[in-house]
Amino acid sequence: MAGTITRLDSSFADEMSELAGFRMKDCYQCGKCTAGCPTSYLMDFPIHQVMLLTLQGRREELLRSTAIWLCVSCETCTTRCPKECKPSVVMDMLRAIAVEEGTLNKHEKYIIQFHKSFLKTVEMFGRVYEVGMLADYKVRTVTLMQDLILGGRMFTKGKINLFPDKIKGIKTVKKLFDRYSNW
Amino acid sequence: MSLGYYPGCALRGTSKEYDISLRKGNDALGVPMPEVDDWNCCGASAGHMTHHKLTIALNVRNLALAEAQGFDDILAPCPLCSKALIAAQQEVKEKPALKDEILSIIEMPYEGKVQVLNYLQVVEKYYREILPGKVKHVFGNLKAACYYGCVLVRPPKLLQFDDAERPTSMEGIVNLLGFQTVDWAMKVECCGGGLTLSRADIVVKLCRDLLRDAKAAGADFIVAACPMCHANLDLRQSGIAKRYEERYGMPIVYLSELIGIAIGMRPADLPFEKHLVTVSLFR
């Protein structure tokens, strides 16, 4: 949890350097990444702190943070880093580990559920099926009323397809999900 | 040179305007662009944010299909798709073991020959010579704010396209189409992307910042080349009006729609009726 130091993992910085393809210790905490981050104003740990916590091996806190889910992957941090670090890739890797281990933040469960519902329809049809994704997401998050009017307007404008678009190679796509996803 | 089309999921559903106008413009300009047969989703935000290898694998299948179907270039009009395709291409080039692993599952050869292009690059490469002769120059007094958003230009090392902080390629095209462009500060700022459903509050805030800046710069409309940028800016103006009591009524126009208008299509021939914010500028 934010604020309490849990178990440290001294090998985490090396593990992350390997995964993300740069040396974590190159980060000198200038804060340029956070300065350009569009969602830092909501994060428990803004991106420069995520970099520092990674270096310190505070794995558990990072995996349970809201920060990794509030990141929109806009790539501004990676674009601007004067040390050629890749904070946005660190975010990707932290999310992947959190998903794999099931250590998910409870506050940002809507964001996580959206990703889940989205990928579920890709696994079923090979392409996103909006109605299926929306139904799954809305039921699981109990947010049926939210954006109802907007959804209705989109439907009347023909922006939402009633039926899924299933590809011929769906078996191959399923195999890829079996191999690389545990959702 | 043969150009294939990878529309991606958004252009098949919530962003049909982009697909419809792009195909119409393409037909009018006489550029053949068959669809890559049986393509799958690139994984979008949900994929690369949570499942790195799965996303690479999904896109290797798309690239292998395009290669098998004999395309030299493929257009991925959604920048999220084109970034995912390019990232996959790059990663399997660097990691042969991962490449072999994925190819053994998809049971297809893949050499890495296909070039992935975004819409601006296709305009430059395939339309540039044809366009000037076709432009009617009717709306020369209208001012556009060209909006790039995030992954059309970022991360620059991967994409190798335009300038990541102050890109100008879209302005070049829009000027060529006979419209004026405004200089504005936020053309590469984020709209909130894939948080549109799960955290609409964030999207409303970010889009309001964008609209405010475009309006202050004197823009009559915003030009987008990304389905997420377009959807967020178009769909969330009612939410912005509610939360901030500011009504922008700012038309958000796809670059493909603007090309249609510029080469003489009537607004009724283009899918403006699918927009939530009325587009009545081109009458």
Image (cartoon, coloured by chain):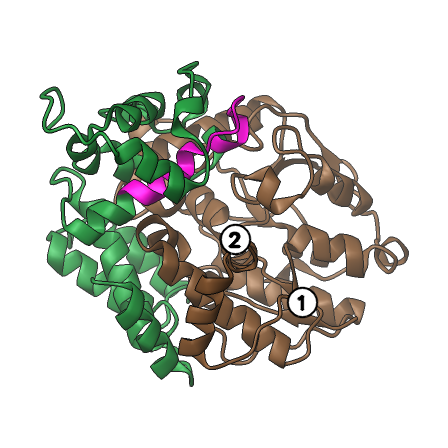
Letter of the brown chain: B
Q: Position of residue B163 (x, y in %)?
A: 67, 34
Letter of the green chain: A
Q: Secondary structure at mark 2?
A: helix
The residue most toward the top is A30
Q: Position of residue B14 (x, y in %)?
A: 42, 61
Q: Secondary structure at mark 1?
A: loop
Say if A57 sits above or below B42 in the image: above
What is the count of numbered marks?
Answer: 2
Res. B281 mark: none
Q: Is residue B21 visible?
A: yes
Viewer-nearest residue: A164 or A27? A27
Q: Position of residue B186 (x, y in %)?
A: 55, 27
Magenta residues span A78-94
Res. B113 mark: 1
Q: Is residue B170 left or right of residue A172?
A: right
Q: Position of residue B101 (x, y in %)?
A: 42, 70
Residue at the (49%, 25%) spot, across then down: B212
**Residue for badge 2:** B87
Pick the quarter of the image with the N terminus of chain B: bottom right
